[in-house]
Image (cartoon, helix red, strand yellow):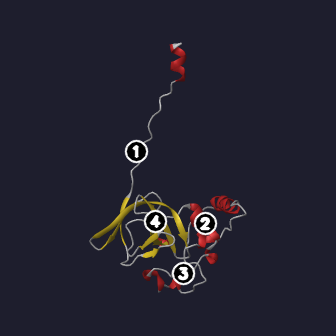
Amino acid sequence: MAERIQETIRIVEPNPPSYAIAIDVFVCETTEVDAAAGTETWVIDKQPGRPLARGHILTLRLGDHVIGSGRISTVDALTRHWVTFRLAGAREGMRVRVPIPWAGLSGYRSYTHTSQFHALSPTPEPHALFKDSPPFADPDENPYEFEMTTGKEIRLLAKLKSISPEHDQTEMLTWE
């Protein structure tokens, strides 16, 4: 009997530790508050030390003042020039809007941004650092490039096409 019990006992080894990446980000002075939606959106003002992506813990700063901290949980909105991330563990409804070049989008979101670029909202306009640069001169031209293999592109296209028909593919991209 004891042998049988030992056979069914499995030793579960713990996962290796996961180290959170903490990043200080500097935001614009004014926040965008949508009382109806219960959101407070802070706009990134200065380029962070690394692209911001899901799982990163952000400390929002305005000069020497700390506004709050939270973990990037999900994409809340995607426009031509910005991605808005929801922050978990921060004040309810707190979000941060990041210029596309400073965001680390997943393969799926990168592909969606590229393939649906012209369907995305052109507002807000690009960050002041990018606005007057040559790649942004033509508002109908996509100034962003995401590198991906042909195989990955095919898989992402299939994923995009598999979105249930009752949801418009561009609906999930243009809300804000």
Among numbered discs 1 and 2, the one appearing first in the sequence: 1
Among numbered discs 4 and 1, the one appearing first in the sequence: 1
Q: Is residue 30 above or below residue 24?
A: below
Outermost residue on the right side: it is 165
Among numbered discs 3 and 1, the one appearing first in the sequence: 1
The part of the image, by quadrant, that contains residue 139 is: bottom right
Residue ID at (61%, 83%): 140
Q: Secondary structure at mark 2?
A: helix
Q: Is residue 58 visible?
A: no
Residue ID at (42%, 81%): 129
Residue receiving disc 4: 93
Would you call the spot at circle 3 few (<14 residues within 10 Å), some (14-19), or many (20 or more)?
few
Numbered mark located on residue 17 in the image:
1
Q: CA distance from mark 3 to mark 1?
A: 40 Å
Outermost residue on the left side: it is 64
Give how far across and how far down residue 77 sits, in percent. 54, 69
Residue ID at (36%, 78%): 29
Among numbered discs 4 and 3, the one appearing first in the sequence: 4
Front of the two marks 4 and 1: 4
Give how far across and how far down residue 160 sits, in percent. 67, 63
Would you call the spot at circle 2 few (<14 residues within 10 Å), some (14-19), or many (20 or more)?
many
Q: Amino acid at mark 3?
A: Thr
Q: Amino acid at mark 1?
A: Pro
Q: Is residue 82 left or right of residue 18?
A: right
Residue receiving disc 3: 123
Front of the two marks 3 and 1: 3
Q: Amino acid at mark 4?
A: Gly
Q: Nearer the viewer, residue 110 or 10?
A: 10
